[in-house]
Amino acid sequence: MAIRLGSWAGAALVAALLGGCGTTAPSRFYTLASTASPGGASALGTGVMVGPVSVPASVDRPEFVVQVAPNRVEVDEFNRWAAPLGEAIARTVASDLAALLGTPDVATAPFANFDPVYRVTINVQRFDSVQGEAALLEAVWTVREVAGGKTRQGRTVAREALEGPDFDALPAAHSRALAKLSGEIAAAI
C-alpha cells in the first residue's frame, strides 16, 4: 500500500511540474489612438458621421496579422486588437476629424438622433503590419454631403515606419497612418 501511494504521489508531482511548464504567455490587447493635431479651421455646427468602414477579411480578426514575407503572414495569438478593427478605425478617424475640423460633432455610424451634414465611408484595401518595418494603409474614401448629395472621393496610401521592435510600435504606426487618412478626408470636407 505504501509503495502504491508513493507512486501516485510521484506521478502527481511529475504531472504538476509538467503542467507548470505548459503555461502560455498572457494575451496583450492594443487600441488605435487619435494622433491628429488640432486644425486651425473651426467647422462648428458641421456634423460628420464616419462609417461604415470595411476592412480586408485577411486582417478582420482580433489577432494581429503580421506580414513576414511578401506572400506570407502569421497570425499572432497573443497580440490582439481590443475592439473589432473596422470599429476601431472608425472611432480613430472620427476622433482625428474632430480635432482637425475643430468640432465635437463627429460620430461613428450607426448613431441615433444625429443628423450629420457629411457622411464618410471608408474602404480599407490594405492594413498591413510588416514585421520590424512598417504599417501600411491603403484606403478609398467618400465624403458625401447628406442634403445636397455632392460627393468627393479620394485614395490614401500611407506607410509609417515602426518606432521600435516590439508589438507596441504597430498600433502606434497604424494610428499615424490613420491620421494621414483623416487629414485628407478633412481637406475634402
Image (cartoon, rainbow, N blue to C red):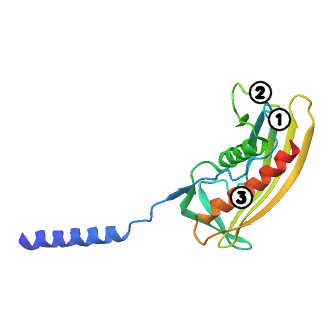
Q: 154 above or below 20?
A: above
For residue 164, what is the image quadrant?
Answer: bottom right
Residue 22 in percent (x, y) is at 38, 69
Q: Residue at x 73, y 34 (%)?
A: 105
Which residue, given by chain and number where applicable, does mark 2 sit on? 115
Q: Amino acid at mark 3?
A: Arg
Verify CB contact (< 8 Å) between mark 3 and mark 1: no
> Can see residue 90?
yes
Q: How much space separates mark 3 and mark 1, taking CA atoms?
A: 23 Å
Badge 2 local density, few (<14 within 10 Å), some, or many (20+)? some
Q: Residue at x 56, y 51 (%)?
A: 82
Q: In whole angstroms, how far apart are the C-alphas of marks 2 and 1?
A: 9 Å
Q: Residue type at mark 2: give it.
A: Asp
Q: Earlier in the sequence, mark 3 or mark 2?
A: 2
Q: Residue furthest front?
A: 40
Q: Could one spot residue 108 in this view of the protein?
A: no
Decide which of tag 3 and tag 1 comes sooner along the chain: 1
Closest to the observer, 99 or 8 = 99
Report the residue at 64% width, 52% height from top.
Answer: 33
Query: In front here: 15 or 141?
Result: 141
Farthest left residue in view = 1
Q: Quadrant of residue 189?
A: top right
**Real-space Cα distance between discs 3 and 2?**
29 Å
Three-letter amino acid code at disc 1?
Tyr
The disc placed on residue 176 is: 3
Q: Which residue is mark 1?
A: 118
Horizontally, residue 1 falls left or right of residue 171, namely: left
Whole-percent x and y of residue 71?
A: 73, 72
User: How many other residues sit within 10 Å of disc 3, few (<14), some (14-19) or many (≥20)?
Assistant: many
